[in-house]
Each structure stands twice: as C-alpha cells, then as structure tokens.
Image (cartoon, rainbow, N blue to C red):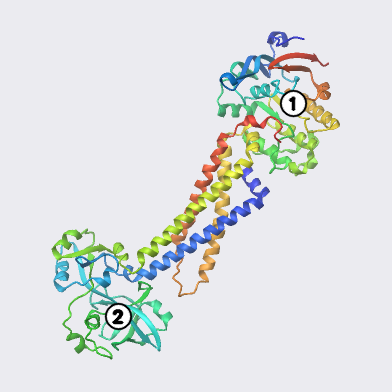
Amino acid sequence: MFLALRELSFARGRFALMGAVISLIALLVVLLSGLAVGLTNDGVSGLRSMPATSFAFSKGTITDNAFSRSLVDPQELAAWKDAPGIASAAPLGVSSVHGTANGQQIDLTLFGVEPSSFLSPAVSRGERLSGPAGIVVSETARAKGLELGSTVTLDRIGVELTVVGFTKGQATFGHVNVAYVPLATWRLIASGTAKPGPPTQAHVDAVAYRYASAVAVQAAAGAAPDLAAIDARAGTVSMTKAQAFNASPGYQPETLTLTMIQVFLYAISSLVVGAFFTVWTIQRKHELAVLRAIGASAGYLLRDGLAQAAILLGAFTALGVGAAVALGALMPSTAPFSLEPAPVAVATVLTIGLGLAGAAVAILRISRVDPLTALGGNR
Amino acid sequence: MNVNPAPSTLAQSTRAQPAPALDLTDVVLDLGDGEASVRALDSVSLRIEPGEFAAVVGPSGSGKSSLLAVAGLLSAPTSGSVRVHGTEVSGLGPGAAARFRLENIGFVFQSGNLIPALTAADQLRLAARLAGNRRLDPEPLLRAVGMERRAGHRPEQLSGGERQRVGIARALVNRPPLLLVDEPTAALDRRRSAEVVGLLAEQAARFGVAVLMVTHDHDVLGHCDRILEMVDGRLAEAAAVA
C-alpha cells in the first residue's frame, strides 16, 4: 500500500471526485434500503408479526389481494384443524374500513381473530382482546391520534369500536394500520347486519354469518406438513407466510420496483468505479511500465491497485452510509422508512464488493503493461 | 575498427576474475513477423566487466534501445546468449525476469522517469521495498547524488538534472552489479549533461557497478571506459577513452 496511499494523497482531487460519486451512490442505496424495509413493514408487518406458518384460502383465490377475496367456511377450517402436522388452525377475517376517531378520518384494516386463539395479539399498552366492542390497534396508529379509550366510529354503518390496547411494534397491512377485533364482531360487520353504536354480545351472537377470510395455520414444532395434500382434502389453496406477503395490496410491485432500482444502482456503482480505474490505469501506463522495468512484479502492482480501490470504496462508502443514517434519523415518523442494521450492512457490503469487482476488472490491465515501453522518450 | 568482436578479444582473462557484469554472445533480435520482420540486433556480442563504464552511440533506429531491452531482460532475444553477472537469463519468463532485474539490474531512464506521486526519498524507498527492504534510509544515497536537501520534493518540483540525479540514486538502491542507462542527457543542457554523467561515472566507480549507457550525446563520452557504435543492428568498438 506504499504507493497506493501516496497516490491517493497526490491525486486527491481526482479521488475525491470519484469518492463523492461513491458516497452519493451509497447514500442512495441505503436510503432505498430504508425505504424498502419501511414499505415492507407498512405492507406486511401485520402478517409478519402473526405466529402463523401458512395461510389457507378458498379454492380459486388468486394471489393478489387474496385476503380480501377469499372466504373460508367452517368445514374448511375444521379440515385444517384436524390435519396432521398442524398445531393450530384459526380463522382470520380481513377487511378494510374507514372511520372517524376524535373528529379525524382514519383508515383501518380489521383483522378478525378469536380472542382465545394464537392469533390474538400481545399488547404493549392496555388490554388484550376480549369484549365485542374492543379493538387492539397498531402502535403506529398513535401517530393518527388514537389513544386508549378512543372510539372509532365506522363510516356508514355507525359501529363504534373502542381502543383497548396497542400491539407490540408496528402492525400494518397494505400501508394501513391494523385493528384487531374479535372474530364475532368482524363477522357482524362483514355480514352487513351491524347496527350503529357499540356492538353487544347479543348482536354478535345473533349473526348467522360463519365465514372468515382465511385459515391461519401454525405447523407443529419440527413438523413439515404436506400443505398440498391438506389443501386437496380441505378444498383450499395454501400459501406460506412469505408467499402470503404478496397477497398484501401493492406489496409485490413496490418491492420489485425498489429491488430493481437497487440492482441498477449496484450495477452503476460497479461500472462507474470500473470506468474510473480504467482511466486511472491508462493514465499511469508509462509509470507502471517504469515500475515493471525496475523489477516490480505484476502481483505487487495488482495488490497495490486493489488496495487503493478498497481504501477509496471503504472510506467513501462509509461516508455515504453515515450520511444516509443521519438523514434517516431526520425522516418524519409517518414516512415508510426504517433503517435496520442487516439491510444497511448488506447495502454497504454490496456497494464495496461490487465496486471492488469493477475496479478489479480495470486494474487487471496492469498485468498487460509492457515494461519495454519504459525505454525511450515517453516522459 | 573491430566489428562485433568476439568476447575473447574484448575481455581480459577470466581466470580468477569475477563473472562479467554483462555478457552477450551472438545475440539476434528480430522484431515483427513475416515480411515485416526487422532485424534489430544482428549477431551482437558484448562483454562488460564489473566496474566498467561502456557507452553505445549510434543514429536513431540503429538498435541502441533494442540492445538495452535485451540486456535488461525487457525483450527476449531471438537467438544467442545473455548472461548477467554470470547467470544465463535469455530464457527467463516475465515474472522471473522482473525478479532478476530487481536484484541485478538498475535502470536510469530518460528524464528520470520518476513516479509523480512520490518524493525523492520515497522513490528510493519504493525501489527498496520492491526488493523486500522496508527500512531503507534514503538519506546517504540522496547525499551521494547531491539531493539530500530535495528529499521531500516530488518530480514536478525538481529540475531535469535533479530528476536524473534521483533516478541514478534509485537505480543504485538495491546495489545491482549492472546499470543500464537510456539517454540520460536527452533533456538536459550541456552543463547539466556533464554533471549527470560525471555523477553516474563517480557513483558507478564508488559502488563497483558496470554501466552500459546508450546516448546520442558525444560530449559526455569522456567519462566512459569504452565507446561502442551501433549501426544497423551491429555493434562495433568505436574508440577507447583512457
């Protein structure tokens, strides 16, 4: 690195310019990573936090928006409960509602779950689900003005639901805060027979509607149940939890778009760094020929060149990542943005690694420099 | 004039004497292929003893640079033998040739050919590090060439003569038995030319290094022990300088 460090200092203007480009790319990559994680959280954190391993939908349901399209009946649920390798199976109702709370309009995704089932959410504040009028809402709904005891009045039908608890962490679905509601209450609302005011036990007991949107399945510990075989018997179609993310509205297009932008940025980073080191190596061709002539091995010069690229990429990527983390801290809490250590580390490693790969291809030219060109009046 | 003298006529008795610093025997170098092929060196034989300062003069295109290239292991001869400090080197591959150059051959180029990013002291340190010496103190060598006060200066801050002085010091860092010098005064005025070649002769004598210098500049030949002339790829003994 003797030569590498001195060249970095000598041509600091050129390297700073290149470094600025690397920093900007790292900044963009990390910000996009934060946006991707934030959007993923916004899209599927409600599903992700569920202790289910798979979901079963009514047969023929297409993946997109499967939760709002599917209807499963008690027979299908029973088939899953009795299936081998399944620890638990519970009905899950999913629907979107609009309402008003504290004079402000609010959108919610209702997750109808049986309060005694494994789907009933743990709470960070307040109480767990119990009574027919109580709801447990996502912690992020507090930013919308909801507090314990707040009443949400659903538009048009006038059903009044009271916030009794907040989930641990974010629980959103399709970028809308989730409100967990007892399945019986969800069925009351879904059946269209609800009356204005808080639902009572008498109201929900009177509902004949016995459907749910899907069956949430929890595989027995260590078991790998044959979902296709159970589907065939139950007359359903299953998705693993990860596959079910694609059933969240807009999830797949959003993640694909962001992934594509990130891939392009990585490719651009690699190409830009490669182009810079190609020009840099060509400019140093005579100097490299002199070094080869006085006895420097190609290996020494290649290692030196790669060390130079690694220092440049490492330093300026760290600068870009640092700036991105600082910018991330300034993001408003309502923005779908979340910087998590693992994605930031992956973005950092990929920016450096792919940049280094681009530089390596360029630096390989060093091995083709002919020391004979050191002779003569080239300098 | 003795054209391409046989080694036996150029060298003194080799008994009980160290191996010649450079010994070329019937070296042929063809450049290009087929009909475009040019014979750059035509049966060249040359022997330079340790401590001897030889100069090669001749018109442009006569083969002077090709002679340096073959002697410096930068070009492999088409045929013939090249021995440096007693070692046959004509068959070495690029990697082995680079290693051999590092320890046995010093180059002084036109205008110094210094590395722009390095100070005068670092030019010497780098040459030493290439040979595995990480603790070189460049000061004595820089003082020997009168450059100790310019140790922290980069090539762009040095005059042409100063660059050549640093180039000479760099070539001597690893104490090679042979120095190959390519037109060292091409970019210098007469006074500087005389100073640089005088310094080269002085340092070569001090370290017991053999020198093969290619030059157009007949004014500096007074420092040389032998003068050879290259014409159309053939080497001839031109004159001896006492």
For the residue carrying disc 1, how many other residues have a C-alpha within 10 Å: few (<14), some (14-19), or many (20+)? some
Where is residue A91 shown, x and y percent of the image?
21, 73
In the rendered structure, the answer to whether residue A143 lies left or right of residue A134 reads right
Quadrant of res B39: top right
A356 in relation to B5, above or below? below
Disc 2 chain ID = A
- Of all residues, the one furthest to the right in this rendering is B191
The Cα atoms of the two marked residues, 1 and 2, are separated by 91 Å
Where is residue A255 shown, x and y percent of the image?
39, 63
Q: Are marks 1 and 2 in contact (CB under 8 Å)?
A: no
In the rendered structure, the answer to whether residue A345 lies left or right of residue A72 reads right
Badge nearest the viewer, 1 or 2: 2
Where is residue B182 shown, x and y percent of the image?
72, 27
Disc 1 chain ID = B
The three-letter code of the residue at mark 2 reads Arg
In the rendered structure, the answer to whether residue A50 lies left or right of residue A264 reads left
Where is residue A122 shown, x and y percent of the image?
32, 75
Which numbered dot is residue B207?
A: 1
Residue under numbered circle 2? A128
B211 in relation to A161, above or below? above
Q: Nearer the viewer, residue B219 or A324?
A: B219
